[in-house]
Amino acid sequence: DILVNISRPDILVHEYGHAMDLFMHKPSTSSAFIPVRTMYAEAILPDLVADPNLRYYLSPSEVFARTYEIYVTIRAGPSYILRDLSGSKVHPRSDDLDRAIVGFFDDLLSDHRRIGPSNPESVLSPLNSS
């Protein structure tokens, strides 16, 4: 179950990122995601080095969900659903990081579109393995 506060619909995008990570067999732990995770970590460390939640912020699934938020914002732009991420210490932005995020998610979603519809069971396998 996902609970989303009606006053913060932007959280749904973050939670959808977690769901994608689960249902797409944890791309957050793939070698293709390492460059994004590394750049993300380098971007947040200066501001959050003493933050007690740093380990959580740097976990693969959390980096995946937060960078997915950035990806959707880049592709769709800020709106009521997509908050303005500027100034967020856990949503760093730079041209290089943005390019890495867009490249990763464009490739991931393109690959999934080719694989997913022809084999719908593969998308549901995390549900069936319980």
Image (cartoon, helix red, strand yellow):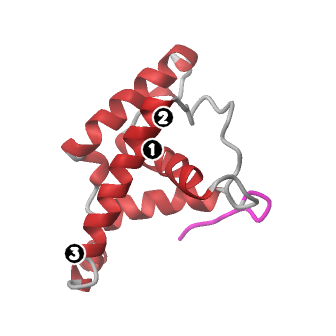
Q: Amino acid at mark 3?
A: Ile
Q: Give the residue displayed 61% in from the left and 28% down from the top.
A: 89
Question: In the rendering, which numbered label is found on residue 38?
Answer: none
User: Magenta segment: does it hold 50?
Assistant: no
What is the three-letter code of the residue carrying label 1? Glu
Do the residues bearing badges 3 and 1 touch, measured as CB atoms within 8 Å?
no
Q: Work out whether mark 2 precedes mark 1 in sequence or the reverse, and give the earlier one.
A: 2
Question: Which is closer to the viewer, label 3 or label 1?
Answer: 3
* Residue at the disc numbered 1: 62
Earlier residue among tags 3 and 2: 2
Callout 2, which amino acid?
Answer: Tyr
- Left or right of residue 76, residue 21 in this image: left
Q: Which residues are magenta?
A: 1-8
Q: Which residue is the site of mark 3?
A: 115
Residue corresponding to mark 2: 57
Give the residue drawn at x 29%, y 43%. Answer: 33
Graded by Cα atoms within 10 Å as few (under 14), some (14 to 19) or many (20 or more), the crowding at tag 3 reads few
Q: Nearer the viewer, residue 90 or 76?
A: 76
Q: Is residue 54 left or right of residue 86?
A: left
Q: Picture coordinates of residue 79 (x, y %)?
A: 73, 57
Disc on the earlier residue, 3 or 1: 1
Label pair 2/1, CB-CB below 8 angstroms: yes
Answer few, some or many: residues within 10 Å of disc 2's Cα (few below 14, many 20 plus, some between 14 and 19): some
- The residue lying at 57 percent from left, 33 percent from top is 90
Percent position of residue 38, x then y: 34, 28
Q: CA distance from mark 2 to mark 1?
A: 6 Å
